[in-house]
Amino acid sequence: MHINHLSLTSFRNYGRLELDFPAGPVLLHGANAQGKTNLLEAIYYLATARSPHVEQDHQLINWEADQPTENVVVGRLVAQLSTRDDLHHIEIRLIKEYQRGQFTFRREALVERRKVRLMDLLGNLRAVLFLPQDVQLITGPPSRRRRYLDITLCQVDPIYCHNLSTYNKVLEQRNALLRRIAESGKGRDVLPVFTEKLVDLGSYLFTRRATFVASLARQAQRIHYEELTDGRETIRLNYLPRLFAANSGRSDEDTVQQAIELAGWLAEQAGLAQVTERFHQALAELQPVEIASGMTHVGPHRDDWRFWVNGRDLSSYGSRGQQRSAILGLKLAEINWMTAETGETPILLLDEVVAELDEQRRALLLNAVQSVSQAILTATDPGMFTEEFLNQATTMTVQNGRVLVDRQQPAAA
Ligand SMILES: Nc1ncnc2c1ncn2[C@@H]1O[C@H](COP(=O)(O)OP(=O)(O)OP(=O)(O)O)[C@@H](O)[C@H]1O
Ligand SMILES: [Mg+2]
């Protein structure tokens, strides 16, 4: 898959951008704070409808355009892409409307110039983004890791995305109901209705996440062992589904072990009916606790996943370099997984990450750059790339929200 043209209007520090992408890798370079990351973010946003930085989406609109004196301010992101067998046109609009000093914000999505639900835009453009702060996937909170699973899966599986969105709504309603039961004793009779819906949707999410992580883990483990550490280090990646009532009397280690076993069962043997039964059982066990706390304690919204290196938890025991290698392995695995699932390579977006890698790892990543149909890289200093790489790439300078092509490869022109 390849983006042929990108248009941005009032997005971040881009007032107006019309940019053609040639074939072959593109290197965006320039000083700090010029808009390199913003450009990758725009492409990623078209793929996922999410910003990699967790913040409110209305902040993506250009500050200068965003004046309360205007009634409506619109940020637009448009991409023309070619896939294996077709050309596509996709667009997201960020719309901020002011009324008496207050604003409302909404988004619109268009595919082939027709309005669609935002959810239905996903999957048209598929991208793998690699940022320096991605190590926080290892060191950060579980919510960050769940977000990673969701964003990645939503790019290839529309049913997952749909079920996830409905699950989150049902979860909110169920929690509100649990609080109401706790406060007034009323509503017990409708709890099974919400539980039933939650279990149906949640069971799909559990199963899909389990098969996804199992497949990602196989790839990441192999890449890490064979290509990143020359057989010195074994990494394991495990999905930790919260499909059981965590027993306060048990050690953390036991709980993790139970989750790992369940993940194996989910990925390999369990049919949806069995998962549903198990989910029901866990919720039934916990009902008094859930009513007392007004919260749903088991379900995919409490899942996690983790890396282990040589048997130890990478978030607590890994060195910074080991954590970086694990993330590199994960990203390379993600490219392979997406390609296998869709029959097409995703667009690879690399933000400043090449600079952080040693020679061997850099070579491996640049290998991946060659293997996809489109890779867009950023760097403050293009000098760290080899002559060989620079000869194949188109380089562009990013300066204060403008992009200038320095040199386009003859082959790519
Ligand atoms: N909504 C917005 N409107 C206008 N400018 C914005 C908006 N959001 C961010 N910016 C600005 O965009 C600028 C460029 O950001 P970006 O992260 O893309 O820089 P960069 O070229 O990647 O720099 P670095 O090399 O430091 O990573 C920053 O100065 C930031 O303040
Ligand atoms: Mg940047």
Image (spheres, rainbow, N blue to C red):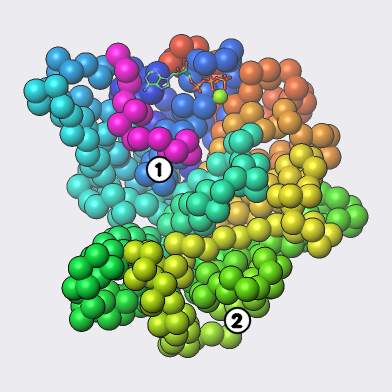
Q: Give the residue drawn at x 57%, y 15%.
A: 32
214 inside magenta stretch = no
Q: Earlier in the sequence, mark 1 or mark 2?
A: 1
Residue at x 47% of width, y 88% of height: 274
Residue 55 among those drawn in magenta: yes
Residue in the picture at 27% in, 81% down: 192
Q: Amino acid at mark 1?
A: Arg
Q: Is residue 86 visible?
A: no
Name the residue tied to disc 1.
50
Q: Relative to 244, say whether 337 is above or below.
A: above
Residue 330, position as x, y percentages in the image: 66, 52
**Residue type, label 2:** Trp
Direction left: furthest residue: 100
Dot in front, 1 or 2: 2
Q: Is residue 107 above or below residue 405?
A: below
- Find the magenta span and give its range: 51-64
- The reply to whether dot 1 and dot 2 touch (C-beta < 8 Å) is no
Work out whether residue 92 or residue 81 is closer to the camera in this orientation and state it: 92
Expressed as whole percent of the image width and height from the top left, the position of residue 342 reads 50, 61
Quadrant containing ligand 2 = top right
Instruction: For mark 1, give the secondary structure.
Output: loop
Q: Disc 2 marks which residue?
A: 265
